[in-house]
Structure formats: C-alpha cells, structure tokens
Image (cartoon, helix red, strand yellow):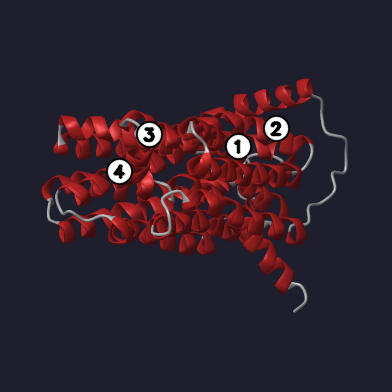
Amino acid sequence: MSKKKPKGLTITAIGSIPLILVLGNSMLIPILPQMKSELGISQFQTSLVITAFSIAAAIMIPILGYLSDRFSRKAVVIPALTLYGLGGLLAGFAAAWFNNAYLWILVGRIMQGIGAAGTTSMAMALAGDLFKGGEQSKVLGLVEASNGFGKVISPIIGSLLALIFWYAAFFAFPIFCLISILLTIFFIKEKKKEKEPPSVGQYVKGLVSIFKSEGRWLTVTYLTGATCLFTLFGILFYISDVLEKDYKIDGVIKGGILAIPLLFMTTTSYITGSKIGKNMKLMKKLIVIGLLLMTISFASLVFFKKLIPFFSVLVVSSIGTGLALPCLNSFITGAVSSEKRGFVTSIYGSVRFLGVAIGPPIYSTLMGWSRSGMFLTTAGLTLFVCLLSLFFIKVQKQEGEKQKGKKKENDVDSLFEKLQFT
C-alpha cells in the first residue's frame, strides 16, 4: 500500500512534464487569428509565434539532453519549466502593456521554446531510469498518452481562455508549469550517480560508438517518430482550414472536432503502452501495422469529402499513430545505458519537434497544389517509412532468449532474427 501511492504520484509527475510541452503550441492555435488583428501583424509574422517556439526547442533539446546525462534529469527539468513559465509571463505582460508587444511576445516564445526542450525527452529518460521491464513500457505509454491528451484539450482550453481576453493563455502557462515543478520536486526521486560523469570528449566518443553500431535502426526510429508527428499536425492543419472555410466552424466547437482524431490516438497509445511490456518483436509488429493503417487511411481519404465519412476514415490513421508511438518510445529509451539515455532520447524529441514544426507549412503548400496529391503523397511517405521500419528496426534479444539461445542454436525464431534484423 505504501509503495503504490508514491509510484502513482511519480508517474503523474513524469506525465505532467510532456503535457506542458504540448500546451506550448496547441493552446495558442485558436487565438492566432485574433492576435493577428489585435497586433496588426501579417500572416507570416503570426506563424513565427509558433515557429520561434519550435525552432528554439529543436536546437536546445540535444544540449539539455547532454546536461541531463552529466548532472541529473531534475537539474534540467526544473529550470526548464521555470524558464517556460517566465516566457509565458513575459509574452502576457507584453500583450497587455508593452508598446512593441509583438517583438517581446517573440522573445517570450523563444524562452518558452528553450524551456520546452527539457520536457518530453526528459520524461522519457526518467521513465527509462526509474522503471524497468513491462512497467517501463507502461509508463512510456502513459507519457505518450499524456502528450496526446494535451493535444486533445489544449485547443479547447485556448478557446475558453480567449473568452476572458485574447492573451489570457500566456498567463496560464506559469500556472501549469508551477504544478509540474512541484510534482517533480516532491515525487520524482532520482538514483544517485554511482560514478563520476564522463568528460565531454569521452561522452562524445561513447555516442559516436553507439551510432556506429546502432545508428541505422536508431535513425529509422527517429524518422518514423518524426513522420508520425509530421502527418498528424499536417492533417490537423488541413482539417482546421476546411472546418473554417467550408463549414464556417470555429472557436470551441472547432477545437472539439479537432480533438476527435487526437482522442483516438491518445486512447490507443495508452492501451498499447500498457500491453506491450518489453516484447520487442511485438513492438516492431505494431509499428509496422500502425504505419500500414496510416497508409491505408491517408490513401482512402482521397475518396471522402463529407465530414462524417472523412473523420471515420481519418481515425484509422490516428489509431495507427497510437500503435506506433509508444513502441518507438520503448525502442529509443531501451537503446542505450542510462548514462547516455538523455542525449539519445533528446535527439528523438528534437526530430519529433521538427516534424511538428514543418507539418503545417508543407501541408499548406500541398493543399494549394492538390487535395488528392496531398493525401497520396502522405500515404507514399508512410508506406516508405513502414518498409524502412520493417527492414531496419533491430529487435534485440532479451536476457531469457539469450540463455535459451545457448541451448537451442537452431531455434527458428533465432534464425529469423539473424536473417531479418541486421
């Protein structure tokens, strides 16, 4: 009894960290049109409010990952969340009282992006550090579900806050950050490092050796994760545009409709994470199946334009994304020792962030080209990544299998692994 409660609170604390990251962009999307009119800025300037955040985060994620490996995860997470909250305060006060509000909002957003770099990848690293075996996969599934849950609720929260005043969302950020900081301080207890951290030279040498031996399949998992987020946010951008232009739906109702595919993704992520354990063969199968579902869904969307049939087909891709992401998280987190886990998971977080950042502008271009071409191009991409995952993601033998392998050299599964996973 005494053990379960702290463990549950530890999981809650870890889950709160990526939730903050998701709120950073998604909560502001509903207020961007009003921000544009209130500040008298162009469409391009408005988009920079999202882009500045994303680029700052993508650049800083690997740096903070290294610092977390050298010192500790909490030593990075707490200052990062503090900076995130302060950036929100600066942007909010700028919108309310500053003369050159737009410039200071951008400065605040860059601060938030730097802070956001210490969120999701650090949560994944913490899950890898503090939990083992099937429990680790379950916690990683919850991290992904928390990420998805944030995507579901953030447009709705942003729309509701805008009813108070358009920049109210900026003042909400420090409140969310403070909650996560307190949870992290009191309920995440890291193990003390048993040995001195390596020098920068030794650390880089170790990482180079990892990417020499594991680089091929790690690169494919990075690409797969980025593709999942790229297509997710690109399609959401398309839906947001269609709802407003063709159906005249905006505000809270629009946020609720956008939440439908995200809800399916979040639910699937949670169930997948709770069931996969450390079964790496199953994880690989689910990644491939998830990408196939995405491919079928995107290719089929060419034939559906009415809202209800369109969403019925679209949720298939959301389920596919929900199958793939928790498995990718487990592969990445288990790829290396805890001493280098922060950096490896941070690179993964960085490429995911880049996927989110480039999704809307690329889909905007594809929408101007051809609706059918957009969906078929998306399906082609997910099919290509599916094939890469099938042939290059490596399934490592678990300890029990290694021991059995000594006695059964000609075991069929062992032979299959040697032939297929190089």
Q: Is residue 371 above or below residue 305?
A: above
Q: Gap in Å between the C-alphas at discs 4 and 2?
A: 33 Å
Q: Gap in Å between the C-alphas at discs 1 and 3?
A: 25 Å
> How many circles with numbers are drawn on the protein?
4
The residue depicted at 44 percent of the width and 35 percent of the height is 49
Residue linked to disc 1: 346
- Label 1: which secondary element: helix
Can you give x and y, in whole percent of width and height, for residue 67 in the image? 73, 34
Residue linked to disc 4: 237
Q: Gap in Å between the C-alphas at discs 1 and 2?
A: 8 Å
Which sits in the foreground, 344 or 44? 44
- Label 2: which secondary element: helix
Q: Amino acid at mark 2?
A: Tyr
Label 3 close to label 4 by CB (< 8 Å) = no
Q: Residues within 10 Å of mark 1 (few under 14, many from 20)?
A: many
Q: Gap in Å between the C-alphas at discs 3 and 2?
A: 30 Å
Looking at the image, tell me whether mark 4 or mark 2 is earlier in sequence order: 2
Query: Does residue 269 appear left or right of residue 89 in this picture?
Result: left
Please identify the quadrant where the N terminus is shown: bottom right
Q: Is residue 201 above or below residue 253?
A: above
Looking at the image, tell me whether mark 1 or mark 3 is earlier in sequence order: 3
Looking at the image, tell me whether mark 3 or mark 2 is earlier in sequence order: 3
Residue linked to disc 2: 66
Residue linked to disc 3: 47
The residue depicted at 84 percent of the width and 44 percent of the height is 193
